[in-house]
Image: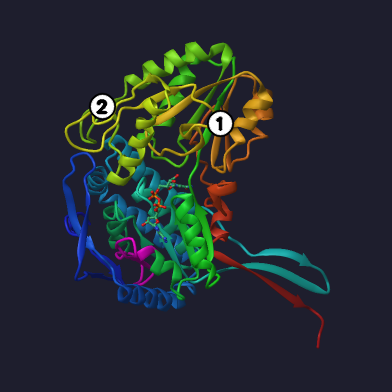
Amino acid sequence: MGGDIDFTTFQNVIGGKLSSTAQTRHGINPATGEPNAEVPVSTPADVDDAVQAGKAAFKLWSKTSFDERRQTLLKFAGALEAHGEDFIKLLVKEQGKAVPFATVEFQSALDTIRNTTSLGLKEEIIEDSDDKQVIVRYTPLGLAVGIVPWNFPFMLAIMKIAPAVLTGNTIIIKPSPFTPYCGLKVVEVAQKVFPPGVIQALSGDDSLGPWLTAHPGPAKISFTGSSATGKKVMESASKTLKRVTLELGGNDPAIVCADVNIESVAQQIAMMAFFNSGQVCIAIKRIYVHESIYEKFRETISRITASFVVGEGNEEGVFVGPIQNSMQYERVKGFFADIEKEKWTVATGGTTDIRKSGYFVQPTIIDAPPAESRIVAEEPFGPIVPLIPWNDEAAVVEAANNTKMGLGSSVWSNDLAQARRIGDQIEAGMVWINTHQDVAPAAPFGGHKESGIGYEGGVGGLKSFCNAQTLCIKKNKL
Ligand code: NAD
């Protein structure tokens, strides 16, 4: 392997073949504003073709053994690995993140494939008496559609492909129009090891997602994106009772108790608030700090945040890249505009338009904004976070839960009993103690409340691509 995949041209993958479209479009390199390569704009006919090929492939793929599928996925990880350098370069160019973080995304995605193959999904014997045996089987659903956002275009495509095909489903990947490149190439590489039609990719404009969710062919939509779009996906999928898994937005609180090492905790929290320029579903988006250490903590986290290098992803030492696209840039700038309008106090940062080209903003901390302000209540999905003092445990739990979101959360304390007491009351899919974004591959990853429906990860994640079937065998002679 090696140079046999061309990383400069991009096509759909339908029924095992590369396929172009009459109309094309392109993404923008967010660090330079320059256009990236042209990609297909799929039509309803392309959707029909991919659905037909995916359903046909399902007939054979669903009959293969779990072990065969596991082996094929491991070969897939190897095939991707052979193109590591190309994928990392492409990810920097299309998404904006810095090389070390693109490398981490690439490696974590390969780990995800390998970890997923180590999971098993066995029949469960519920009852085995003289009289009868009751078995629960998990059978694949059919053709799935994986709809992917623009913040982790490589990783999130893989997180859908691996559990879908391991359980015997086929899948069409639809990348975000802002970041279509890695998704298309991942699927192109998959053609080396998977039969035609098992893994396909369609790129397009804003019409493509709704066409796929409304199409009667697919059996399942695995969606990662905003809560607003998730609701539309569920509404559209409901017409044909497609199964849905929705991984949606978050507004993760971090609750810092009085007894922590300020330097170390401020360092970790700053990293997890500003990593990927804050464009992480499980980024820390609200920082609640005990009032007894508030001033010292503010000073420390502001100093650390001000030291983060902002820049283009190939530049040395960059931690904060650009906002990924112009739409999101305008939204994030709206929060910066509120600084003056709402008379917020800035602990560090506060400016936008810091470079001549590209969608850059300065990592920013807002000092003690009112609880009802937009920066606390909404998910900015950019490098701007509120720092809020607290003094009463019950009140800080209530404040942390005072959101429609419920994705991640964290409590920071040397008193693990206190941390558990607080953590147990948080309404969120992931509660971390003295860490954040620490995703355990075999555990559920998903949101409570409007952060999602269902979850990915672990055996439960595999089951979400399956129907449960109860098989009841009466043993008596007829
Ligand atoms: P988005 O909802 O705008 O888009 C996500 C995907 O859905 C894109 O591929 C888009 O083209 C497609 N889409 C848009 N409208 C559609 C429709 N009507 N029907 C079907 N598909 C449609 O989200 P985004 O801005 O790309 O991503 C940012 C959001 O994603 C944030 O809210 C973030 O928190 C969330 N997110 C969640 C997770 C998680 O695992 N919970 C992970 C990453 C990002």
Q: Is residue 450 above or below residue 434?
A: below
Disc 2 crowd, CA 10 A, few/some/many (<14, 14-19, 20+): some
> Residue 281: image x %, image y %?
45, 42
> Residue 383: image x %, image y %?
37, 32
Residue type, label 1: Ser
The answer to which of marks 1 and 2 sits earlier in the sequence is 2
Residue 44 lies within the magenta run: no
Find residue 18 and report its image quarter: bottom left
Q: Is mark 1 within 8 Å of ligand 1?
A: no
* Magenta span: chief secondary structure: loop
**Image-based side of 222 in relation to 125, left or right:** left
Q: Nearer the viewer, residue 352 or 183?
A: 352
Q: What residue did someone put label 2 on?
A: 317
Q: In the image, which residues are magenta?
A: 191-209
Which residue is at a point 55% across and 43% down the rendered structure image? 405
Q: What residue did someone put label 1 on?
A: 410
Task: Give the CA distance from mark 1 to mark 2.
Answer: 27 Å
**Image-based side of 280 in relation to 293, left or right:** left
Residue type, label 2: Gly
**Image-based side of 357 in relation to 450, left or right:** left
Give the colouring mode of the picture: rainbow
Q: Is residue 116 visible?
A: yes
Q: Is residue 338 above or below residue 392?
A: below
